[in-house]
Image (cartoon, helix red, strand yellow):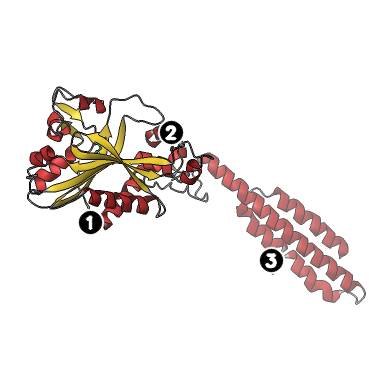
Amino acid sequence: MLEQINLLREKGQNELKSLTSTDQLPDWYHQYLGRKGDLTSFLKQLGTLSAEERPAVGKIINEVKQEFQQSFDLRQETLRESKLHEELEIDDLDVTLPGRPCTTGHLHLTTQTLRRIYQIFQEMGFQVYEAPEVETDEYNFQLLNIPEYHPARDMWDTFWVDDEVVLRTHTSPGQIWAMREYYPDPIRVILPGKCYRYEQITPRSEHQFYQVEGLTIGKNIRLTDLIGVMTEFAHKMYGEDRKVRIRGSYFPFTEPSIEIDMSCSCKDKADSGSGGCRLCKYTGWLEVAGAGMVHPVVLRNGGYDPEEWSGFAFGMGVERPALLKHNIDDIRYFYGNDLRFLQQF
Ligand code: PHE
């Protein structure tokens, strides 16, 4: 009987090896390992053996059974794999491959910054007002108290579409739009949007960029209101520990005009003369916005009587603060469409 079992062992293994398709596997299994298979019938014959022979033969049968099971599993695996490969070669659709995950986008750093700014001003009662990006000379300059001959025009290098039409160089023309729409109501708006300047592109300046303008019109609005609002903004945007500094400045559409600076995070070091950083050019102060009280001429151009009404306006960049916040050293990354940059924020 032992001899027969060994023959079966060899035959089974050889046949298993010669199988070429998974379809043939069940037959082999029935024949060798099935309930009515060869090994089972050997087991049944154990009873015919003498008591001395029985344990050794039983042991062998069990060994062979285990061996067959292992070989079967292995063969099954191999045949399945080669079947898959074949199918892949015929048509290259592999339904068992995991799907490619969709890359989900996210908001651009500029949009994120804008939304944070909206949120802060919204808490102070400001509404968002949108004005055109393509403007006339009249709105971009003249109505803002910058007549044609005025040297202040040099402050804005302008893209001229023709003699009359310009790409707005700042969001300030939106002041006129808002006033003409809201008169005779009080106003509290921010005007976000893209601006354009005919400038050399450098790490610090782009020819297109975002600004957020602010405008309030009401009775008895004063410079201290402006300073209060901007201080609150600086604290919310950059942290309660920021200090705000006011410098006198000049804009044709505000009187008086100021420049608003905010303390840099390196201010203590810069003050003690022991350091500072490149961002603030070692001064300890960062420029946040140009601002001032709306000029009487501008109020009148918007329809409001300067004897009765007053207001403040400010204008700030959007990329620059984001640049400062994230220590980015080149503004050109913002619109360079390089995902390696964009995905970091
Ligand atoms: N429009 C000015 C600029 O672009 C900024 C500004 C806005 C200044 C409003 C004062 C008031 O430089």
Q: Along the horizontal axis of the image, is 303 left or right of 31?
A: left
Q: Position of residue 5 (x, y in %)?
A: 83, 62
Helix, strand or loop for disc 2: loop
Q: Along the horizontal axis of the image, is 81 left or right of 94?
A: right
- The three-letter code of the residue at mark 3 reads Gly
Label 2, label 3: how many angstroms apart (C-alpha)? Answer: 74 Å
Q: Position of residue 205 (x, y in %)?
A: 36, 30
Q: Residue at x 21, y 40 (%)?
A: 256
Q: Residue at x 69, y 69 (%)?
A: 35
> Which callout, 2 or 3, points to the residue nearer the camera?
2
> Which callout, 3 or 1, points to the residue nearer the camera?
1
- The three-letter code of the residue at mark 1 reads Gly
From the image, which quarter does the N terminus lie in? bottom right
Q: Residue at x 48, y 41 (%)?
A: 270
Above or below residue 36? Residue 241 is above
Q: Position of residue 93 (x, y in %)?
A: 49, 44
Above or below residue 66? Residue 54 is below
Q: How many marks?
A: 3
Residue matched to label 3: 34
Contact check, label 1 and label 2, Cβ < 8 Å = no
Q: Along the horizontal axis of the image, is 128 left or right of 92?
A: left
- The three-letter code of the residue at mark 2 reads Asp
- The answer to whether residue 156 shows anywhere in this view is no
Residue matched to label 2: 330
Label 1, label 2: how many angstroms apart (C-alpha)? Answer: 34 Å
